Structure formats: C-alpha cells, structure tokens
Image: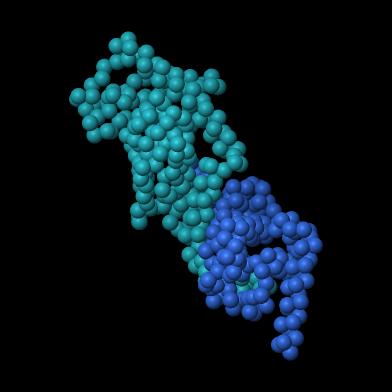
Amino acid sequence: MDEFDRELEEAGRRLSPDLNDAHRATLDRAAGASLVGGRVSLRNRAAAVVAGIAVAATLATLLTVSITHRTGSSTSNGASGGATGQEAQIGAGNGVSASQSISNEGTASAQGTATIPSPSAVTGTQAPATILSPKSVNESNDGANVVLHVGQQLQVTLSGGVLHWSEPRSGNGVVLTQLSGQTSADGGASAVFRAASVGQTMVFSAGNPACAPRCGLPSRGYELTVTVVV
Amino acid sequence: MEYVIVMGSSSGEAGLAFDDLFASAYHRVVGAVAVVTGDEALAKDAAQEAFARAHGRWSRVGRLDCPDLWVTRVALRVAIDAWRRRRRESPLSTALPAAVPDDIQRLWVRWNLAGLSPMQRATVVLHHSEGRPIADIAAHLQRSPNTIRTHLAAARRRLRRAAKEED
C-alpha cells in the first residue's frame, strides 16, 4: 500500500471510526436490497418458490378449516381461554404432504396466546409452518408463513442479546402497513403491522452480532412470509 | 436462517470472506470517496452502499483478484451519481459542501487536489492510486475516454504548477 492509500485509510478511519456500526448498517442495507431490489438471489428465488407452495397450502388449509366450521365438527372454546389445535393436511406443490397443527383464530385465548407451531422443527422438503391469524410472533417463528385477514394486526418481537436486530420491516407497505417499530439498546427490536390489503409480502429483520465483524460470528436474517386474505 | 458470513466461509471456493474485506478496506473506501467529494456523510453512505452491493454479489465479487478495487469503484460511482443528482436538482449547491472535514482538506492540499472538480479527483484517485486504465475509468464514471484524459491532463497541469510554486 503506497503513501496515498495509507493516507486515504487514515482519513477514512477518522471520518468513520466505528467499524462495527458501519458493518451493521451495511448488512442492514444489503438485507433491505435483497427484499426490494430488482435482482433476486437464488436463495430468494428458492424462497419465492417455497412461498408459492405455502400460499397454495394456506389456501387449501383455509378451505379445509372453512369446510370444517360449516359441518360443525369443530368446537370453539374461546370462552374458556384455551386454544384448540386442528390437524390439517397441507398438500405441497411438489407432492410432499405435511401435517401441521394450526390454531384457529376463534380459539385463541383472551391474552392472545394462540398456539404457534415452531418453524425451527421444519426441515428438508417440508413446507414452512403456517400460522393463521397470530396476534404476535417472535424469533422462534423465523421462516414461518403467516396468514392474516385484512384489518388484523401483527406484532413482531425479537429479543436482543447476542444479536442486535434491525427494526422489522414490511416488504410491501400496501399489503402490510407498519404501524410502529423500534429497536432497544439490548439489541431487541419490535414492530406492529396491520394487514391492509389482500396480497403477499415479507417481514424482514437482520440480526447482527454485537461483536461483528471482528469476532466472525454469523449474522442472521429473520423472515416471515405474510399472506393477507379477505 | 443464516444469510451471511462466517469468517472465511462465505467466500465460496476462492477468495476472502466478506467480513475480511470489510474490515480491511472499509476505511480506505470511505477515505477515497471523501477525498473525491469532500462530503463526509456522502462518503460513508456511498461506501456502505458499495459494500452492500458487494455483499449481494459476493459469489462473484469474492472471487475477484482485488474485490476492494471493485468496491472502491462502485462507491465512487455511487457518490458521483449522487453529486450529479444534487447538481441537477439544485444548481446552486454545486459548490463544495459547506464544511469539508479538516482531514480531507489536508489531503487536498498535500496532494494538490483542492482545485479539482469531484470528477477530476475521482479520475486521479482511480488512475493514480489504483492504476486503472483510462478506458476502465471512463466506463465506471460513465464518461468518454477523452473526457477522462482531459480531467487527468488538467490534474497534471495543476500538479506541475504546484510543484513549480514549491520550487
């Protein structure tokens, strides 16, 4: 490195001394670009395919739940505050079927603690977990497909600690409008969204280790695929 | 859902990891853009934008011989595009930013860059610091090779004049 380069580096170091902050901001920006940018990575294309399958599965699930309600085979016990799980066969587009426990909106407890299956258990060719009308989700729901009705609100809460989360963002404000959002000093982040119109979008947050980039710990992306139905 | 970088693991089969590049080159990229534009905020913004683009194309950028040069060129182009946009939107703001950081002013004086336009400074930085051929610089700055030669000639004239004055 010649003298000019050295001086450029020293000037840059004085102008932007906090490398960790800059690294975090850069990764946030990269994560945002991958959501809204015109270029779609292979990973995102794969995610889009999975999301498409999930939408089909979701519609099938909605149909199943609707039929079940009409035939009166389901009992809603919202008054007792319990959550009743319903088993639904979700047929994926590739022929793989997954049996998942899905909580019905009407059976969530008064505190809004709907039963949410953990997507972390979903691996391989299985479709991601589908969550119907949840009031809130957290980091354990990473990768899930969330189905909301127009007008419903969704709170996303990510706990800080090792990772510093960016404010969760909606990929499409027309479909899912962000009502509020914040990050906290301990690295946590939360946001409240409202399902505004029928469509599909994603909610994304980037979790970067507080010690990055020097410690070499990996960053994480948090993604929800949100489908808004009537 | 991990989408980036464990040290040494996100670079694919060859090259270095994104984090390594960031740690080793970020400050120099910020410095280069700041020297060109004289604008501290724009320098940070353009550098982060360039690194974010590199991150998005890391499977390709990470295999380049000198990915830091790729990032520097992208950052300079981002900064100059922003500068041009600003000039179109508000012609009165073509003057230098109100407060050029002292560190940058010192570099301008030391390397005789003070009287040059941002385009001329970008040309000097790319050509002299990074040894890019004129055709490359022209492509990256979206100018004709002749324009780049003119910028370089103007910069050299200034350097010669400054050298004579020092003698």
Q: State left or right for residue B160 relative to residue A214.
A: right
Residue A42, given in percent of the width and then of the height, sits at: 60, 38
Which chain's colour is cyan? Answer: A
Protein image colouring: by chain
* In-front residue for pair B148/A42: B148
Q: Which residue is painted at 37% across and 47% down in the image?
A: A181
Identify which residue is drawn at 20% across, 24% down: A79
| Residue B7 falls in image quadrant | bottom right
| Residue at the (27%, 28%) spot, across then down | A108
Q: Nearer the viewer, residue B41 or A126?
A: B41
Identity of the residue drawn at 65% across and 70% down: A5
**Residue B167 % position (x, y):** 74, 89
Residue A176 in the image: state x and y as whole percent.
42, 36
Q: Is residue A136 above or below residue B106?
A: above
In the rendered image, the residue lying farthest to the left is A80
- Is residue B93 in sight in this rendering? yes
Residue A143 image position (x, y, % from top left): 45, 36
In the rendered image, the quadrant that contains the N terminus of chain A is bottom right
Seen as rendered, the residue at the extreme top is A71
Colour assignment, chain B: blue
State left or right for residue B113 relative to residue B38.
right
